[in-house]
Amino acid sequence: MTKVAHLIGNGKSASLYQPSKGLKILCNLPPFAIANAYTTVMVDFKMMKSIHDGVLSVPGDWVLGARPKKWMELKPNFYLKYSSQIKEFYTVLPKYAGNYTDFNCGHMACHYIANKLKCDEIHMYGFDSLFEFDITSASDMYLQSSRDNNNTQRLTAKWRPIWKGVFNEFPNTQFVLHRPKSYGDAKIPLPRNVEIVTK
Protein backbone atom coordinates (compact mmCIF):
# COMPACT_ATOMS: atom_id res chain seq x y z
CA MET A 1 0.00 0.00 0.00
CA THR A 2 1.35 3.41 -1.03
CA LYS A 3 2.11 5.78 1.85
CA VAL A 4 1.13 9.30 0.75
CA ALA A 5 1.96 12.69 2.27
CA HIS A 6 0.82 16.19 1.39
CA LEU A 7 3.36 18.91 2.15
CA ILE A 8 1.73 22.34 2.30
CA GLY A 9 4.26 25.13 1.96
CA ASN A 10 3.92 28.89 2.29
CA GLY A 11 4.01 30.08 -1.33
CA LYS A 12 0.98 31.58 -3.07
CA SER A 13 0.13 28.29 -4.78
CA ALA A 14 -0.39 26.52 -1.43
CA SER A 15 -4.06 27.25 -2.12
CA LEU A 16 -4.01 24.43 -4.70
CA TYR A 17 -4.18 21.93 -1.85
CA GLN A 18 -7.58 20.30 -1.45
CA PRO A 19 -8.47 17.89 1.39
CA SER A 20 -6.96 14.54 0.43
CA LYS A 21 -6.14 11.17 1.96
CA GLY A 22 -2.68 10.87 3.45
CA LEU A 23 -0.52 12.65 6.01
CA LYS A 24 -0.71 16.44 6.05
CA ILE A 25 2.57 18.14 6.96
CA LEU A 26 2.73 21.93 7.25
CA CYS A 27 5.60 24.38 6.84
CA ASN A 28 5.30 27.09 9.52
CA LEU A 29 1.75 28.41 9.21
CA PRO A 30 0.10 27.96 5.80
CA PRO A 31 -2.21 30.73 4.55
CA PHE A 32 -5.30 28.74 5.60
CA ALA A 33 -6.24 26.12 8.19
CA ILE A 34 -5.54 22.46 7.38
CA ALA A 35 -7.69 19.90 9.17
CA ASN A 36 -6.08 16.85 10.78
CA ALA A 37 -2.48 17.95 10.21
CA TYR A 38 0.11 15.35 11.21
CA THR A 39 2.68 17.97 12.22
CA THR A 40 4.03 21.45 11.60
CA VAL A 41 7.70 21.78 10.65
CA MET A 42 9.68 24.83 11.78
CA VAL A 43 13.36 25.67 11.34
CA ASP A 44 13.86 29.33 12.27
CA PHE A 45 14.78 31.31 15.38
CA LYS A 46 12.31 33.98 14.26
CA MET A 47 9.41 31.52 14.43
CA MET A 48 10.40 30.57 17.96
CA LYS A 49 10.78 34.23 18.95
CA SER A 50 7.35 35.07 17.55
CA ILE A 51 5.79 32.23 19.52
CA HIS A 52 7.76 33.29 22.61
CA ASP A 53 6.63 36.92 22.23
CA GLY A 54 2.99 35.90 21.74
CA VAL A 55 2.90 37.27 18.19
CA LEU A 56 1.57 33.98 16.87
CA SER A 57 0.36 30.60 18.02
CA VAL A 58 1.11 27.36 16.19
CA PRO A 59 -1.37 24.61 17.04
CA GLY A 60 -0.79 20.86 16.99
CA ASP A 61 2.43 18.85 17.06
CA TRP A 62 5.78 20.25 15.92
CA VAL A 63 8.86 18.82 14.23
CA LEU A 64 11.71 21.25 14.85
CA GLY A 65 15.06 21.75 13.17
CA ALA A 66 18.50 22.54 14.59
CA ARG A 67 17.93 26.26 15.26
CA PRO A 68 14.68 25.77 17.22
CA LYS A 69 16.50 23.02 19.15
CA LYS A 70 19.21 25.56 20.02
CA TRP A 71 16.52 28.07 21.02
CA MET A 72 15.04 25.52 23.41
CA GLU A 73 18.47 24.87 24.93
CA LEU A 74 18.96 28.61 25.49
CA LYS A 75 15.45 29.08 26.89
CA PRO A 76 14.53 26.03 28.98
CA ASN A 77 11.35 27.66 30.27
CA PHE A 78 10.14 28.03 26.70
CA TYR A 79 10.95 24.37 26.11
CA LEU A 80 9.01 23.29 29.19
CA LYS A 81 6.01 25.37 28.13
CA TYR A 82 5.80 23.82 24.66
CA SER A 83 7.41 20.40 25.16
CA SER A 84 4.06 18.59 24.90
CA GLN A 85 3.73 19.87 21.32
CA ILE A 86 7.20 18.77 20.21
CA LYS A 87 6.91 15.52 18.29
CA GLU A 88 10.66 15.47 17.69
CA PHE A 89 13.77 17.39 16.70
CA TYR A 90 15.01 16.61 13.20
CA THR A 91 18.57 17.85 12.75
CA VAL A 92 19.70 15.87 9.70
CA LEU A 93 21.71 18.13 7.36
CA PRO A 94 22.48 16.62 3.93
CA LYS A 95 25.94 17.38 2.52
CA TYR A 96 24.41 19.14 -0.49
CA ALA A 97 22.66 21.66 1.80
CA GLY A 98 25.88 23.09 3.21
CA ASN A 99 24.40 24.69 6.33
CA TYR A 100 21.16 25.00 8.28
CA THR A 101 20.54 28.53 7.02
CA ASP A 102 20.28 27.34 3.41
CA PHE A 103 18.23 24.24 4.36
CA ASN A 104 14.86 25.97 4.57
CA CYS A 105 11.61 24.77 6.10
CA GLY A 106 10.34 23.23 2.86
CA HIS A 107 13.60 21.37 2.29
CA MET A 108 13.66 20.00 5.82
CA ALA A 109 9.99 19.01 5.80
CA CYS A 110 10.36 17.20 2.49
CA HIS A 111 13.54 15.45 3.65
CA TYR A 112 11.84 14.45 6.91
CA ILE A 113 8.87 12.97 5.04
CA ALA A 114 11.06 10.95 2.66
CA ASN A 115 13.78 9.96 5.12
CA LYS A 116 11.99 9.55 8.46
CA LEU A 117 8.36 8.90 7.56
CA LYS A 118 9.35 6.78 4.53
CA CYS A 119 6.47 8.04 2.40
CA ASP A 120 6.30 6.65 -1.13
CA GLU A 121 4.57 9.68 -2.62
CA ILE A 122 4.93 13.32 -1.57
CA HIS A 123 2.56 15.94 -2.98
CA MET A 124 3.95 19.47 -2.68
CA TYR A 125 1.95 22.70 -2.71
CA GLY A 126 3.16 26.29 -2.42
CA PHE A 127 6.75 25.77 -3.59
CA ASP A 128 6.64 28.66 -6.03
CA SER A 129 10.36 29.41 -6.16
CA LEU A 130 10.85 26.17 -8.12
CA PHE A 131 8.88 27.72 -10.97
CA GLU A 132 8.93 31.49 -10.51
CA PHE A 133 11.31 34.18 -9.33
CA ASP A 134 9.15 34.48 -6.24
CA ILE A 135 10.00 33.67 -2.64
CA THR A 136 7.11 35.52 -1.04
CA SER A 137 5.59 33.49 1.74
CA ALA A 138 2.46 33.37 3.86
CA SER A 139 4.80 33.80 6.83
CA ASP A 140 5.55 37.34 5.56
CA MET A 141 2.16 38.30 7.04
CA TYR A 142 3.48 37.83 10.57
CA LEU A 143 7.29 37.66 10.25
CA GLN A 144 9.38 40.40 8.69
CA SER A 145 11.73 39.06 5.98
CA SER A 146 13.83 40.80 3.37
CA ARG A 147 12.39 40.16 -0.12
CA ASP A 148 14.48 42.67 -2.09
CA ASN A 149 15.90 41.60 -5.46
CA ASN A 150 19.40 40.83 -4.17
CA ASN A 151 18.11 38.66 -1.35
CA THR A 152 15.60 36.95 -3.62
CA GLN A 153 18.36 36.12 -6.10
CA ARG A 154 20.65 34.84 -3.35
CA LEU A 155 18.03 32.65 -1.76
CA THR A 156 16.70 31.32 -5.06
CA ALA A 157 20.23 30.49 -6.22
CA LYS A 158 20.85 28.51 -3.02
CA TRP A 159 17.43 26.95 -2.56
CA ARG A 160 16.90 25.52 -6.03
CA PRO A 161 20.05 23.33 -6.12
CA ILE A 162 19.11 21.89 -2.71
CA TRP A 163 15.80 20.73 -4.18
CA LYS A 164 17.73 18.89 -6.84
CA GLY A 165 19.72 17.20 -4.06
CA VAL A 166 16.56 16.16 -2.18
CA PHE A 167 14.93 14.69 -5.29
CA ASN A 168 18.07 12.78 -6.24
CA GLU A 169 18.69 11.46 -2.73
CA PHE A 170 15.36 9.63 -2.76
CA PRO A 171 15.04 8.12 -6.26
CA ASN A 172 12.37 5.66 -5.13
CA THR A 173 10.12 8.40 -3.76
CA GLN A 174 7.58 9.95 -6.13
CA PHE A 175 7.47 13.73 -5.73
CA VAL A 176 4.44 15.54 -7.17
CA LEU A 177 4.74 19.32 -7.61
CA HIS A 178 1.40 21.11 -7.87
CA ARG A 179 1.53 24.39 -9.79
CA PRO A 180 -1.03 26.84 -11.23
CA LYS A 181 -1.49 27.16 -14.98
CA SER A 182 0.06 30.63 -14.93
CA TYR A 183 3.48 29.29 -13.89
CA GLY A 184 6.21 28.38 -16.33
CA ASP A 185 8.45 25.32 -16.37
CA ALA A 186 10.57 24.29 -13.40
CA LYS A 187 13.77 26.33 -13.08
CA ILE A 188 15.89 23.24 -12.35
CA PRO A 189 16.18 19.94 -14.23
CA LEU A 190 13.78 17.48 -12.64
CA PRO A 191 14.67 13.80 -12.33
CA ARG A 192 12.26 11.06 -13.39
CA ASN A 193 10.81 10.69 -9.88
CA VAL A 194 9.35 14.23 -9.98
CA GLU A 195 5.96 14.84 -11.61
CA ILE A 196 4.29 18.20 -12.24
CA VAL A 197 0.53 18.54 -11.91
CA THR A 198 -0.91 21.75 -13.36
CA LYS A 199 -4.21 23.03 -12.00
Image (cartoon, rainbow, N blue to C red):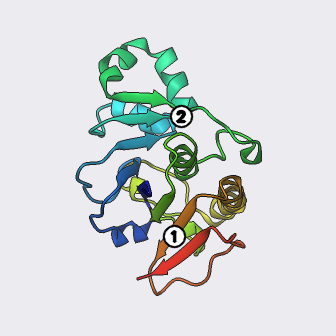
Residue 154 at what x, y percent from top left? 70, 59
Quarter of the figure with the C terminus: bottom left
Q: For numbered disc 2, what is the local secondary structure?
A: loop
Foreground residue among 198 and 74: 198
Report x, y in % for residue 54. Answer: 29, 33
x 47%, y 86%: residue: 182
Three-letter amino acid code at the position of disc 2: Gly
Query: What is the C-alpha distance between the residues marked 1 and 2?
Result: 23 Å
Which disc number belongs to residue 89? none
Which quadrant of the structure image shows residue 48? top left
For image coordinates 34% across by 67% down, the residue present is 17
Count of numbered circles on the image: 2
112 displayed left or right of 50: right
Q: Residue 177 carries which label?
A: 1
Q: Mark 2 points at which residue?
A: 65
- Image position, residue 159 (x, y; %): 66, 57
